Image: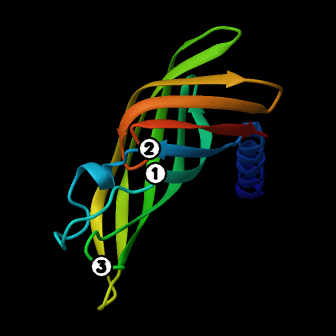
Amino acid sequence: MKKFLLSLLAVAGLTATASALTPEIQLSYGGYTQMDATDMHGGFGKVNNAWGALTAGVYLPVAPKIDAGVSYTFSSSSFKDTNSSLYYHVVMVNGRYQYYSNSIVKLYAKVGLGVDITHFAADGISNKSYFAYQVTPVGAKVDLSRGFGIFGELGFGAQGLLQVGVTYKF
C-alpha cells in the first residue's frame, strides 16, 4: 500500500510540474547561414548562396531565466555550374539564458548544437551529415500580447547571422 501511495504521489507531482511548463513555439527566418560560410556541400563544385533559413522551434522553461528546446531548420541552394540542388535539414538542441528583462524587452543569449543533413539532388542522389551549431550572444524578444511576441537575434550558425521571427507562448 505504501508503494502505491508513493507512486500516486510521484505521478501527481509530475503532473503538477508538467502543467506548470508553458511551451513557447517560434517561427523565424535567418540570413547568411553556416551552410553558406563553410564547406557544407561536400566540395562538389561552386555553390550559390542559399536564400536563407526557415526555422521552427519549441522551448520549455527548465529553470528561472533558462529555457531548453529543439529546432528544425530548412535551407536550400544550387550548384553554379549545373541545375543540381542542395537541401539542408538541420535539427538542433538549444539552450537559452535570459540575462536582462524589463516590462518591454527581454534580452537573452542562445547556444544550439546538432546535425545538418545535406541532401544532394544531383546525378547520383546522396546525403552527407555535418556538425551544426548556432551561437547567439544577443537576442531580443518583445511580447506584443499575452501569448504573442516578436524577436530578433544576432549570432552565427545554421539558423543565420541575423534571425527574426514570431513566438507564441501557451
Name the mark nearer the viewer: 2 or 3.
3
- Nearer to me, 78 or 75: 78
In the image: residue 88, left or right of residue 124:
right
Amino acid type at image mark 3:
Thr
Tell me the residue that label 3 is attached to.
82
Hey, which quadrant is residue 48 in on the image? bottom left
Residue at the farthest bottom position: 124
User: Of the numbered discs in the image, which one, if any, rests on residue 52?
Assistant: 1
Residue 21 seen in the figure: no
Residue drawn at 48 percent across, 26 percent down: 97
In the image: residue 163, left or right of residue 47:
right
Say if mark 2 contacts mark 1, CB within 8 Å.
Answer: yes
Disc with the residue nearer the chain's start (2 vs 3): 2
Tell me the residue that label 2 is attached to.
31
Residue drawn at 55 percent across, 29 percent down: 152
Disc with the residue nearer the chain's start (2 vs 1): 2
Hey, which quadrant is residue 122 in on the image? bottom left
Q: Quadrant of the N terminus?
A: bottom right
Horizontal and vertical percent position of residue 14: 71, 46
Secondary structure under the numbered disc 2 in the rendered image: strand
Q: Quadrant of the C terminus?
A: top right
Say if mark 1 contacts mark 3, CB within 8 Å.
Answer: no
